[in-house]
Amino acid sequence: MGIDYNKTMNTFITSLDQEVSNQMVVTWDIGKRCNFDCVYCDPLTHDNTSPHASLETLSNTTDFIKEYLDIIFKYKTNNEDFSISLTGGEPTTNPNFPELTKYLKEKFGKRHVSVTSNGSFGKNAFDAIVDNLKNITVSYHCDAGPKIKEKVIQNILDLNEATKVRVNLMFHFKDEYFRECIRLTKFFEDNKIRYTPRVVNHKPYTKQQTNWFKDYWAEKAKAKLLIDKTKVHQIGRESIKVNKEKERLKTGNPTEEHKHIVKGRHCCASLPLLFENKETDTWEKGTYCTDTNFKNWFCSVNWFFLHIEQQTNKVFHHQTCQANWNNTRGPIGTLSESHLIIDRLKKQVSGDTVPVLQCTIDTCKCGMCTPKSQSIDTFNTIIKKHVKDLKFKNVS
Ligand code: SF4
Ligand code: SF4
């Protein structure tokens, strides 16, 4: 029987859980300052004039993260599973970056902290990354001048010897840059450097450029698809057969089924998920959810994410969804008054029941994998696997 695509997740999938992971992810934008000026980068994200955060300020934020996580980890069932990712702007332009990494290592240990950078840094930052951080993601941007790009490539090669590096190869739509990126895919493959070609969102790629991406991903997907993905049970996708996928890869055209399923998505890390299916009254495994609308669901995003914006002084549960208490969105507080965030969290977990966030938006992006449910009772059941000794209540 074919799938009734009018039945969205909210009519037959009523809860979503992570199958194995219980990771707490902290993202920390340490400042807007950047030495590049990529044409596709928002001026709200970068500039070349913002003051650098002082070491004292950065240390205070580190202490706040530690205090916050210590409270969260009293209740998480796996308090070893967490990551802190430094971003910007360009984090390494801050002259306090090496000292900051040292302090972070002291507080959290080397294996929990990583950085995303444009890769143009000098020796001090290089040594700090190798000595103090778990790994680095270098985003390669074609907009920089030739001398700087030479430096970036050399850093990537050296990092590949000294630590774990992955490259985000940002495919610029300008023809000469696009061709530069294609040449680099070969260079990275020859040098055994892990890389991912990235599309710059909402930019005008030509048909030929788009086809290059299609071919690239089709090649990459073929092997994977024919081994694993076809075996993964994905709710709502039962009738999408391998031959349909093959056909799509060959022609580049979405099949009728694919036209419908674009409403859904995988979790960013393709984590295995569990879905409660109301129709069959069962929990089923999958990696793909047929919809991203969880509006009004009870969501545990605050037990899995924390986002900090150093330059604006703001703290969020999650960078993009910005879920907040009382069915609102926005910052949960400020760094300069971070004691208020800590006080509220302590108060919440010390009560007989703990408040739970409710989703207020109709498109969930990178918070997909956080356990969530339409029912507070089911939420309490599934959250036990991740958060112990607390009972959650509906506060709306
Ligand atoms: S390097 Fe990163 S932060 Fe700097 S301008 Fe480019 S995209 Fe923006
Ligand atoms: S958008 Fe945020 S609050 Fe809504 S379901 Fe996703 S992670 Fe949860």
Image: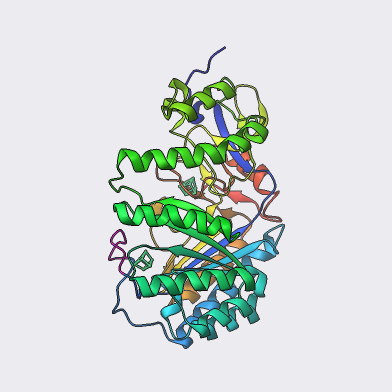
User: Split into 4 quadrants, where in the image is the N terminus?
Assistant: top right
Q: Is residue 295 above or below residue 329?
A: above
In magenta stretch: residue 39: yes
Q: Nearer the viewer, residue 338 or 133?
A: 133
Q: Main secondary structure of the magenta part?
A: loop
Q: Position of residue 276 (x, y in %)?
A: 62, 32
Q: Can the viewer see residue 373 in this picture? A: no
Report the image quarter containing ligand 1: bottom left
State the image coordinates of residue 55 (x, y, percent, origin top left).
47, 87
Residue 375 shown left or right of residue 325 in the figure: right
Residue at the top extreme? 1
Q: Residue at x 69, y 65 (%)?
A: 74
Q: Which percent across, then down, holds residue 159?
A: 58, 71
Asked if residue 345 lies in the magenta stretch, the reply is no
Seen at 30% across and 73% down, the residue is 47
Q: Seen in the image, is 317 located left or right of residue 386?
A: left
Residue 185 at what x, y percent from top left?
Answer: 49, 54
The magenta segment: 37-44
Residue 258 showing in the rendered view: yes
Horizontal arrangement in the rendering, residue 3 relative to residue 201 (left or right): right
